[in-house]
């Protein structure tokens, strides 16, 4: 009998949709030209590149000229932060950056790199128990030498959506550049970079059913930052390297589908997510849902189960054919508790028992019910072997 397989880690990556693959395929063989070439093959590739740029720009209400393709969200974060830091430091504007303690490591490690190697000063803001940054805390952290504020749009582990428009307003009032890592958000919730006052925004294709290895950085017209990748004149001389046309075409199609399906995507994922939360909280005692229940990514569920560790949960879930994670895909190999869960105030022993289940477009109601039936038994089994649980029950 074939093992049941249920994928519940859409925040880590998504399958590429058939419509996306179909649109990509010709550009591996027939439309293989280099977009920088001055003949028909090159012109055809260039046309496909610009069509994709328009589609990605349309998803976030940007101008096509403000969208620059990268190799993914991590590169986009690195480019935005390093590019702004070096450009503004060189101009004598300052060397202070404001971020939060719950950022993705692509942001945190970049900030640490600038601190350690280039003398930048970084303020890491606390968050509340839901994982939210207070815009007033951002305002209070601003100094005369502050040059950049970088706060993620939505957290990859606990799904909390940040008050981005309010934070951007604080930045604008103080004439400070504002960047947001929207890798989890762009294509999953509505974003209007113009209305929200965003200066720079990182995005990724593989979170919205497009190919891996391709992303984008939105840079508002008029914003000047250093280049991260040097070499050729691609991407209006701002990001060197022969363009990955099949992946860019795929990202463009994925962005178009995301925009067309956004309303239904949000309502369906939210419904399934809420059923999953309700079912597990009803059946499993000593369980906490992490992150904001109101301002939350539609597909995100993050539980903490007391008295057990996440690794055991993941192993047993996999045994039953359920793929999940204990947090960010980039750190899932680590045995350390999540920096996000510690930042929202969870003690180490409870943070260790975390589980992230993320719902996607291919998740069925049957999948949700199977997890609600299966997970409580797994938790009960692990707790039965836990001295911590035994001690708590015997108090």
Image: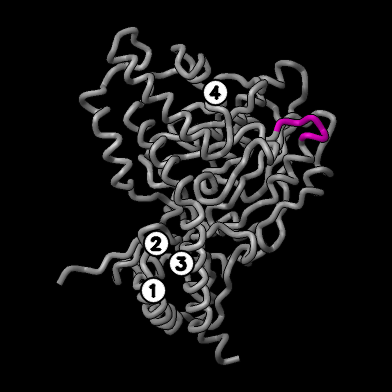
Please report whichever mark, 3 or 1, sits nearer to the chain's N-terminal start: 3
Question: Residue placed at 74% from the left, 27% from the top?
Answer: 95
Residue 343 against residue 286 in the figure, above or below: above
Q: In which quarter of the image is the C terminus?
A: bottom right
**Quarter holding residue 140:** top right
Residue displayed at 59% across by 66% down: 290
Q: Label 4 belongs to which residue?
A: 65
The residue labelled by disc 3 is: 310
Q: Where's the N terminus, which quadrant?
A: bottom left
Q: Position of residue 369 (x, y in %)?
A: 38, 76
Residue 330 among those drawn in magenta: no
Q: Residue 382 carries which label?
A: none
Return the x and y of residue 301 as percentages of the image width and height: 51, 65
**Which of the two discs, 4 and 2, labels the residue nearer the N terminus?**
2
Q: Give the range drawn in magenta.
A: 172-177
- Residues under numbered marks 1 and 4 in contact, where contact means CB atoms less than 8 Å apart: no
Secondary structure, mark 3, is helix
- Of discs 3 and 1, which sits in the foreground? 1
- Tell me which numbered mark, 4 or 3, is placed earlier along the sequence: 4
State yes or no: residue 174 in magenta.
yes
Label 1 to label 2: alpha-carbon separation: 10 Å
Where disc 4 sits, the SS reads helix
Image-based side of 115 in relation to 325, left or right: right
Q: Helix, strand, or loop for circle 1?
A: helix
Above or below for 99 versus 271: above
Q: Mark 2 points at which residue?
A: 8
Mark earlier in primary sequence (2, 3): 2
Judged by depth in the image, the label closer to the viewer, 1 or 4, is 4
Q: Residue 371 carries which label?
A: 1
């Amino acid at each position: 009998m074939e093992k049941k397989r249920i994928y519940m880690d859409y925040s880590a990556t998504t399958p590429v949709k058939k419509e996306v693959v179909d649109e990509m395929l010709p550009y591996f063989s027939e439309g293989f030209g280099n977009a920088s070439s001055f003949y028909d093959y090159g012109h055809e590739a260039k046309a496909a590149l610009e069509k994709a740029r328009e589609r990605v720009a349309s998803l976030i209400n940007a101008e096509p000229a403000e969208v620059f393709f990268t190799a993914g969200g991590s590169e986009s974060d690195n480019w935005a932060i390093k590019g702004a830091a070096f450009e503004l430091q060189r101009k004598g504007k300052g060397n202070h950056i404001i971020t939060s303690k719950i950022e993705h490591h692509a942001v945190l490690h970049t900030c640490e790199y600038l601190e350690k190697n280039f003398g930048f000063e970084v303020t890491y803001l606390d968050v509340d128990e839901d994982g939210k940054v207070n815009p007033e805390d951002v305002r209070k952290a601003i100094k005369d030498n502050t040059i950049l504020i970088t706060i993620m749009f939505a957290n990859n582990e606990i799904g909390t959506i940040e008050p981005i428009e309010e934070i951007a307003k604080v930045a604008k009032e103080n004439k400070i550049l504002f960047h947001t890592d929207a890798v989890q958000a762009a294509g999953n919730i509505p974003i209007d970079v113009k209305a929200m006052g965003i200066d720079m925004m990182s995005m990724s294709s593989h979170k919205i059913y497009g190919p891996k290895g391709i992303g984008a950085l939105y840079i508002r017209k008029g914003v000047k930052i250093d280049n991260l990748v040097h070499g050729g004149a691609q991407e209006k001389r701002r990001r060197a390297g022969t363009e990955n046309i099949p992946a860019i075409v795929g990202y463009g199609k994925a962005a178009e589908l995301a925009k067309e399906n956004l309303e239904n995507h949000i309502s369906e994922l939210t419904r399934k997510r809420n059923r999953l939360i309700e079912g597990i909280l009803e059946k499993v005692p000593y369980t906490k849902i992490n992150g904001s229940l109101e301002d939350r990514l539609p597909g995100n569920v993050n539980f903490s189960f007391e008295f057990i560790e996440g690794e055991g949960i993941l192993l047993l879930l996999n045994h039953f054919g359920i793929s999940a994670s204990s947090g960010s895909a980039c750190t899932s190999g680590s045995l350390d508790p999540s920096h996000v869960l510690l930042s929202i105030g969870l003690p180490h022993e409870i943070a260790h028992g975390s589980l992230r289940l993320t719902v996607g477009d291919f998740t069925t109601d049957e999948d949700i019910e199977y997890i609600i039936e299966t997970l409580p038994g797994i938790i009960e089994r692990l707790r039965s072997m836990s001295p911590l649980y035994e001690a708590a029950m015997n108090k």
